[in-house]
Image (tube, rainbow, N blue to C red):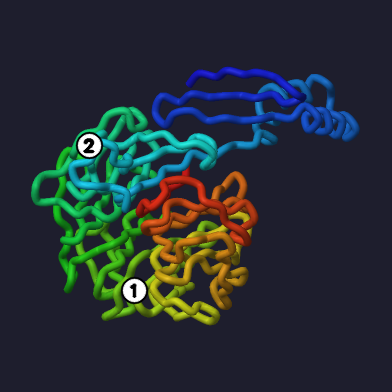
Amino acid sequence: MSRSSAASNNCYCVSEVDPRLGSRHYCLFEKAREQITRFLLRSGTSRLLVLILLLTGLAEAVLARQDTLYMSVLNSRKHRIGALDNPTVGLFMSPDGGKTWQHKGWTGYIRTFYTEGGRDGVLWSACGNGVLRSSDNGQTWRITTGWEITEVLKVKVDPKNPSMVYAATAYGIFRSENSGETWVKRNTGFVKPFVSDIIIDRSNARRLLAASEDGIYGSANSGTSWKKAGLSGMGIRTIIQNPGNPQVFYAGTEDDGFFVSNDAGKSWTASNRGLTNLTVYTIACDPSKAGTLYVGTHGGGVFRSSDGGKLWQPVNDGLTNPVVHAITVLPSDPSVVLAGTLNGGLFKSTDSGEHWIFNSQEEAQVWGLWVH
């Protein structure tokens, strides 16, 4: 990893370049550093220790990290068959929290549903033609799957073992144990294998939950076999795990709204008070506020809850497209929320969803968002 720095206007700026995941940018305000130094000296900390802290760790604590965003653009209404000036689709990356975007996907016309990275720096894209892999931050890609694996809607990487990768497809679950070199279908137990999402329990990586067109399925053995885990007969669009409590899971459905489980997916309860549109495509949690949630719906835009989903209110001022298929909250600044719409592009809010402004990808289908 390489680092460069520059100072201007009382702001000390640091850039780090990681060959696996690209660049990260920080800003350290001199005034904040001076205030921290004075506080440490007043508290009795020796000058030598203050210097050590500033040089080795304290500065990082006050650095304002800017998150890297990955946006998967499936299509655009501006696309015309045979046209030479069609808009670029696929994967886009923003190193500065959505201020600027760079195309990082396959150079041809590839339908990209979702992209996620592993702890080893490898990027994985769920695409219409299979699972794509990049080990150089999106500069080059290769297809890791064969003809039998298409319509990949989500790809998820084991957070502790990046060689273990799961693909949720229109034809069920596929698993790779060797970083995509080989893939094996893992559908034992499914009644209807159309799977739109999969979640790896961060407290037990062998435990999985899958969102199918016939309810939620669970696996206790890394997907080797599956059992129905709830909401039988419902079309499930998405499942996420609460970032602060691994026992809490949330599910969004095709027609039945929002559900919550407080016992690691053993039982589920509908929680739709205030939610006027019951097709829930996407769910996001505010990592700094335990009860703050966002959902993206079909036709109703974005709804926000401050009490863990018990009560919802619409937050759509400035959001000109009400079909929201992807939503994410920036960990470094949770007041910043991004919403990807179908045929309306990407919108950004800097006040927790109170107001939205158009950000990027006019008339595009922003299918997936992932933040690192």
Q: Is residue 63 left or right of residue 318?
A: right
Which amino acid lies under the numbered mark 2 shown in the image of this protein? Gly
> Residue 265, how many percent across, how many down?
39, 71
**36 and 341: which one is in front?**
341
Q: Earlier in the sequence, mark 2 or mark 1?
A: 2
Residue bearing the label numbered 2: 108
Question: What residue is at 69 percent from the left and 35 percent from the top?
Answer: 62
Q: How many marks?
A: 2
Q: Is residue 366 left or right of residue 149?
A: right
Residue bearing the label numbered 1: 254
Q: Secondary structure at mark 1?
A: loop
Q: Secondary structure at mark 2?
A: loop
> Residue 214, how many percent across, how many down?
25, 75
Q: In which image quadrant can residue 15 be found?
A: top right
Q: Is residue 194 left or right of residue 264?
A: left
Question: What residue is at 42 percent from the left and 38 percent from the top?
Answer: 93
Which amino acid lies under the numbered mark 1 shown in the image of this protein? Glu
**16 and 89: which one is in front?**
89
Q: Residues within 10 Å of mark 1 (few under 14, many from 20)?
A: some
Q: Residue furthest right?
A: 42
